[in-house]
Image: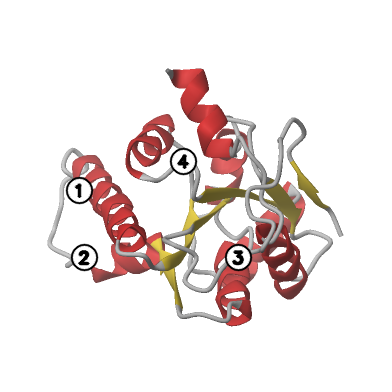
């Protein structure tokens, strides 16, 4: 299995491990469509001893009503949905909940928005990778994604290049990835990926 932490991290922040309640921790899974984020998230929340929430952006898109939209209207509607999703995540974490998020950082503004909203010390950024041929195979098997969606996102999603931990679902199951992530939460380090990304953009 390929799972690695990002070089350059400092001292561990939680020697006692993830405490009950986590204090509003956000576990942020970023990867292309069909990379396995939702499957990892479902496994991960099952490992936590305290109540936690899996918030998926696809669920927010599914909640939106379906009026006829022109091609000119659609980008603004999609952007508002993403922005609302980010604020829902921030609100849940701000109330002290543990939140596992699956996300697609294929547009730079999405990361900027999250950096403004999410607590940098208490956000764990997880890169979910998968080889492109396997992504395309999964996409065809699913049949519910536009052809070429994952390929179009492949280079852009990880362009920021900074993570706390990464997983490759091409050679590891969702359960294996979830266990590695849960183990990492017991030995989180600083500065976090969000702290480093925020410093780069300061």
Which comes sooner in the sequence, label 2 or label 1?
2
Which comes sooner in the sequence, label 4 or label 1?
1
Horizontal side of residue 180 vs 98, given as left or right:
right
Residue at image mark 4: 120
Q: CA distance from mark 4 to mark 3?
A: 16 Å
Q: CA distance from mark 4 to mark 1?
A: 28 Å
Residue at image mark 2: 64
Q: CA distance from mark 3 to mark 2?
A: 34 Å
Of tags 3 and 2, the one toward the viewer is: 3
Give the mark count.
4
Label 3: element kind: loop
Of tags 4 and 3, the one toward the viewer is: 3
4 and 3 marks in contact (CB < 8 Å): no
Tell me: residue 53, above or below residue 191: below
Q: Residue 169's image quarter? A: bottom right
Residue in view at x 39 percent, y 64 percent: 58
Q: x, y (%) of residue 55?
A: 41, 66
Q: x, y (%) of residue 28?
A: 52, 53
Residue at image mark 1: 77
Q: CA distance from mark 4 to mark 2?
A: 29 Å
Of tags 1 and 3, the one toward the viewer is: 3
Which comes sooner in the sequence, label 4 or label 2?
2
Residue at image mark 3: 18
Q: CA distance from mark 2 to mark 1?
A: 10 Å
Q: Residue 136's image quarter? A: bottom right
Which comes sooner in the sequence, label 1 or label 3?
3
Q: CA distance from mark 1 to mark 3?
A: 37 Å
Tell me: residue 130, above or below residue 139: above
Which comes sooner in the sequence, label 3 or label 2?
3
Residue in view at x 50 percent, y 65 percent: 22
């Amino acid at each position: 299995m390929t799972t690695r932490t990002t070089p350059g991290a400092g001292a561990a922040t939680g020697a006692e491990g993830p405490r009950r309640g986590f204090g509003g921790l956000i576990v942020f899974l970023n990867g292309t469509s069909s990379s396995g984020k939702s499957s990892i998230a479902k496994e991960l929340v099952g490992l936590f001893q305290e109540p936690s929430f899996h918030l998926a952006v696809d669920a927010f898109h599914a909640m939106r009503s379906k009026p006829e939209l022109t091609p000119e209207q659609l980008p603004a509607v999609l952007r508002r949905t993403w922005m609302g999703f980010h604020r829902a995540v921030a609100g849940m974490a701000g109330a002290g909940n543990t939140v596992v998020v699956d996300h697609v950082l294929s547009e730079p503004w999405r990361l900027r928005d999250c950096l403004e909203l999410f607590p940098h010390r208490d956000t764990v950024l997880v890169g979910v990778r998968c080889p492109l041929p396997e992504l395309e195979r999964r996409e065809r098997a699913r049949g519910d994604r536009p052809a070429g969606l994952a390929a179009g996102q492949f280079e852009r999603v990880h362009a920021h290049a900074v993570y706390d931990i990464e997983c490759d679902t091409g050679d590891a199951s969702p359960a294996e990835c979830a266990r590695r992530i849960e183990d990492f939460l017991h030995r989180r380090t600083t500065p976090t990926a969000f702290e480093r990304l925020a410093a780069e953009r300061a």
